[in-house]
Image (cartoon, rainbow, N blue to C red):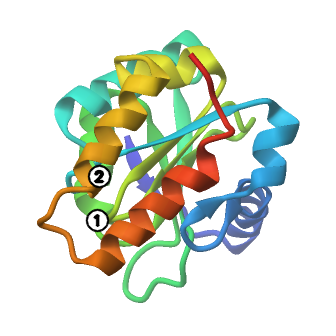
Amino acid sequence: MLEVVAGLKELGKIRALADEVVERPNHLRLDFLTRQGWDAVPIESACYFVERTARRISSASKALGVARCYGIATEEVQNAPRAYLMSLDTETILAFGKTAYPMLYAIIPEKRDFSVLCTPDCLLVAGPHSFVVEVLGTSISEARSKYASFFTSSKWPEENRRWFESIVRRYEPFGRD
């Protein structure tokens, strides 16, 4: 299920939810991460989700007892929905990725159980340690190392590499093995 949310009252509620978690347009709020005691780890994104990542998000959310969430635009969008209500099965997550890419969106359940911030540069996976590690499919240190090797590749212009490195530095305090 991937439904566009169109009602103004519901959109206002969803925007408030996003504002609590997301520092628009492309960061999570550090104060929120600290209060929640969450881990936050960037990983490479490929049009947001490859099947393996979508499957892991689905499994990790089910382990938390979460079956649905919102996909919320974290930037002003033109000719695109500002929010979706979506189930967290693999197929819907993949469909959401194809629909939302390359705009900036965050996946956030109503009770703020976790967040996945979707940017063209990375997915920022945040939540309780068990959720994050399940989505990563490896240790936090290994995932950070993989992301570092991705952004230090010579294929990226220096400006991009500095941006990727700033993401790693920003979220480094959030999560240990």
Nearer to the camera, 79 or 57: 57
Amino acid found under the numbered disc labelled 2: Tyr
Location of residue 107 with respect to 84 vertically, above or below: above
Residue depicted at x 54% and y 68%: 26
At x 22% / y 77%, what residue is drawn? 157
| Residue plotted at (33% across, 43% down) | 147
| Neighbour tally class for label 2: few under 14, some 14-19, many 20 plus, Cα within 10 Å | many
The residue wearing badge 2 is 48
Q: Is residue 171 left or right of residue 167?
A: right
The numbered mark at residue 125 is none
Label 2, secondary structure: give it. loop
Residue 62 relative to residue 56: left or right: right
Give the labeled residue for mark 1: 101
Residue 84 in sight here: no
* Picture quarter with the C terminus: top right
Circle 1 crowding by C-alpha within 10 Å: few under 14, some 14–19, many from 20: some
Q: Residue 82, percent across and down?
A: 52, 72
Which percent across, then down, holds residue 86?
Answer: 45, 43
Looking at the image, residue 163 lies above or below residue 118: below
Which quarter of the rendering shows the N terminus? Answer: top left
Amino acid type for the residue under numbered disc 1: Tyr
Task: Left or right? Give the position of 32 relative to 104.
Answer: right
Are circles 1 and 2 on residues that touch, CB within 8 Å?
yes
Q: Which of 41 and 103 is in front in this view?
A: 41
Instruction: Name the spot of residue 37 as percent of width and height, x first.
Output: 79, 30
How far, Cα to Cα, is label 1 from label 2?
7 Å
